[in-house]
Amino acid sequence: MVKKIKLLKEIKKYFSGDVNSPVRSFKSVGMTPIIIKSGSGSKIKTYNSKTYIDYCMSWGALIFGHSNTDIIRAVRNQLSYGTSYGFTNNYEVELAKEISKALPSVEKIRFVNSGTEATMGAVRVARKFTSRNKILKFEGCYHGSSDLLLRTDNSFIVSYNDLESVEKTVKKHYRSIAAVIVEPIAGNMGVILPDKNFLMGLRNICNRYEIILIFDEVITGFRIQYGGAQIKYNIKPDLTCLGKIIGGGFPVGAFGGKKEIMELLAPSGDLYQAGTFSGNPISMIAGLKTLQKLEYADYGLIEGRTEYLCDFIENEAKKNSVDIQINRIGSMFSLFFINKKVYDYVSVKKQNVKKFKKFYKLLFNKSVLFSPSPFESNFISFAHTQEDIEKTIKIFSSVLRRIR
Ligand SMILES: *Cc1c(COP(=O)(O)O)cnc(C)c1O
């Protein structure tokens, strides 16, 4: 405990807001940051030796759980051959091949070091290709922390699932719109599913006005199934952004798509984009191992566990007269304390945040770690056992009874 108190002091001294990434502050749930010592399988252990069943899983990056043996073995083996070369290595090729096989829309790819870099690259190359400047994006979607995608002066922002507004905006401004960027399944305002015709509608509008359609699949890529949302819904974006899972727990990002667009990147084109650690062998090998395992993995297993957990929560909430709405797809899910459907950012914001905070703390005190915000998704990995789920269910019973 002394150690932890000392650490907390130093954290306050060195880090703005006590963290290196905002949601980790636990401010959204009225708590203070937790400090992690280790992770193994479905569990995460803090510096003061508390163990939690982890449903955040490094924000979805760890589809095989913490320190998966196969991935660790592959990485450990590479370590003695070097960690970064600053030159091309064969694992970049292997991983590109694997991604392109799973996502045929990705004809050419560039590896970068984070999802933020991936979306920046995609937007820049779309601007170059179209000689247009603005982007159209959706309220509540997150595309990394670059000015390019956080600023509002260079973009049109409309509601997720609101195809009519897209149509209207594009009709009026298409001459200045380079790209439409969207999370094909939103995961950064909690899980929000696309309406039946939403993505196809976007594809049609983009075709009509020669706008680049960018799918930000940084979360959904290899999460909901092998490949991503574009395979599930059978819609081909012009550019795709990837990250999280394709790094197997190491820092990574990638953007790719149509050959003629990607060829604009230097050195074949004159849009300069570069990275010292891009395609480094550690991230590439970890990603490669992950995708190789996923190709033969039974996604039905993690989807089934997610369904089982969510169904239980829904029933238990009903029994206790707690208004809850659960959105889920594959192995990602969010719960909102609200009695109406949640389908865009406006409806997400109507949830009872006070109730969420209370719920979050109770859950946390019983050693279940959800993503620490009412505006994030939770993830079930292949390391989550039926026993983990049963344990979580028991805890939910007692927690839901107390937040009525
Ligand atoms: C996480 C995320 C990003 C940013 O990725 P980083 O690796 O954190 O920079 C971009 N888009 C989406 C959809 C994400 O979920």
Image (cartoon, grey):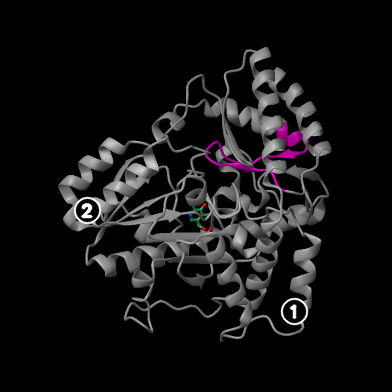
Label 1, secondary structure: give it. helix
Q: Nearer the viewer, residue 279 or 56?
A: 279
Label 2, secondary structure: give it. helix
Q: Which residues are magenta?
A: 363-381
Q: Which mark is residue 92?
A: none
In this rendering, position of residue 85 left or right of residue 2: left
Q: Mark 2 and 1 residues: CB-CB less than 8 Å, in contact?
A: no
Q: Nearer the viewer, residue 5 or 316?
A: 316
Counting from the top left corner in percent of width and height, residue 94 is at 61, 74
Residue at 67% in and 72% down: 285
Membership of 379 in magenta stretch: yes
Q: Main secondary structure of the magenta part?
A: loop
Q: In terms of image quadrants, where is residue 359?
A: top right
Amino acid bearing label 2: Tyr
* Residue at the spot of label 1: 79
Amino acid bearing label 1: Leu
Crowd around label 1: few <14 · some 14–19 · many ≥20 (10 Å): few
Counting from the top left corner in percent of width and height, residue 327 is at 55, 32
Residue at 73% in and 27% down: 396
Q: Nearer the viewer, residue 53 or 372?
A: 53
Counting from the top left corner in percent of width and height, residue 29 is at 59, 37
